[in-house]
Amino acid sequence: MTTKEISAKEVKALRDRTGAGIMDCKAALQESGGDMEKAIYILRTKGAAKAAKRAERQAAEGTIGSYLHHNGKVAVLVELNSETDFVAKNPEFQQLARDLAMHIASAAPITVGPNDIPAADVARERAVYEAQVAEDGKPENVRAKIIEGKLQKWFKESSLLEQPFVKDPERTVRELVDAVSAKTGERISVARFVRFQVGGA
């Protein structure tokens, strides 16, 4: 079996989508036989292992990203952390902070990650879904599964890292952050954010 010849254009396309190194992209494309989606999966699997190692390191430097909507009615501040001041001053890191602030203004997440959602909010949503499935007359044996499915969907919609990135819905905010983390070789994390809206939450 011959190895598929991988073009520079394919490598660049994969690099643009994942932020992984050129050699890693080429290796993933060769391993996947040129299948872009499989190559992305391979890189994410390997990237997740690297990210887990980076997660053990402290990200104590960083910047505050800000966004003020043109109508003056929505504003966001977001704290983005890195391990070193060198990366914190990197233009790509600074752009990520601005992009995150703009995304938060548009998508209005509740928390950074699913585990940060307050238990009271989860209980409230669960009660709503329980009432819905009861109203729909769903059989008892499938209700729990339906409720859990609805909750998982709500977690993704409500937490920043799980939301599709507004400027590129093909990837999540988590994938966007991981791509910049891969390029810098440092742990990058969203510490917190606050979203202000005139006349509302």
Image (tube, rainbow, N blue to C red):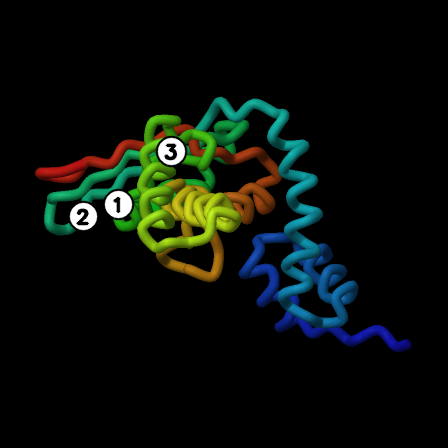
Residue 122 numbered mark, or none: 3
Left/right placement of residue 64 relative to residue 31 reads left
In front: mark 2 or mark 1? 1
In front: mark 2 or mark 3? 3
* Circles 2 and 1: CB atoms closer than 8 Å: yes
Q: Residue at x 76, y 71 (%)?
A: 33
Q: Nearer the viewer, residue 8 or 47?
A: 47
Which residue type does callout 1 highlight?
Ala
Which residue type does callout 3 highlight?
Val
- The answer for how far apart the CA atoms under marks 2 and 3 are is 30 Å
Q: Residue at x 63, y 25 (%)?
A: 56
Mark 1 burial class by Cα count in 10 Å: few <14, some 14-19, many 20+: many
Q: How many marks?
A: 3
Which residue type does callout 2 highlight?
His
Left/right placement of residue 149 relative to residue 48 reads left
- The answer for how far apart the CA atoms under marks 2 and 1 are is 8 Å
Q: Which quadrant would the C terminus be assigned to in this image?
A: top left
Residue under label 1: 105
Q: Earlier in the sequence, mark 2 or mark 3?
A: 2
Left/right placement of residue 140 relative to residue 78 reads right
Percent x, y for residue 162?
45, 46
Q: Residue at x 64, y 51 (%)?
A: 44
Residue under label 2: 69
Percent x, y for residue 42?
70, 56
Please tell me whether mark 3 sits on a helix, a strand or a loop. helix
Please tell me whether mark 1 sits on a helix, a strand or a loop. helix
Is any part of residue 4 visible from this angle? yes
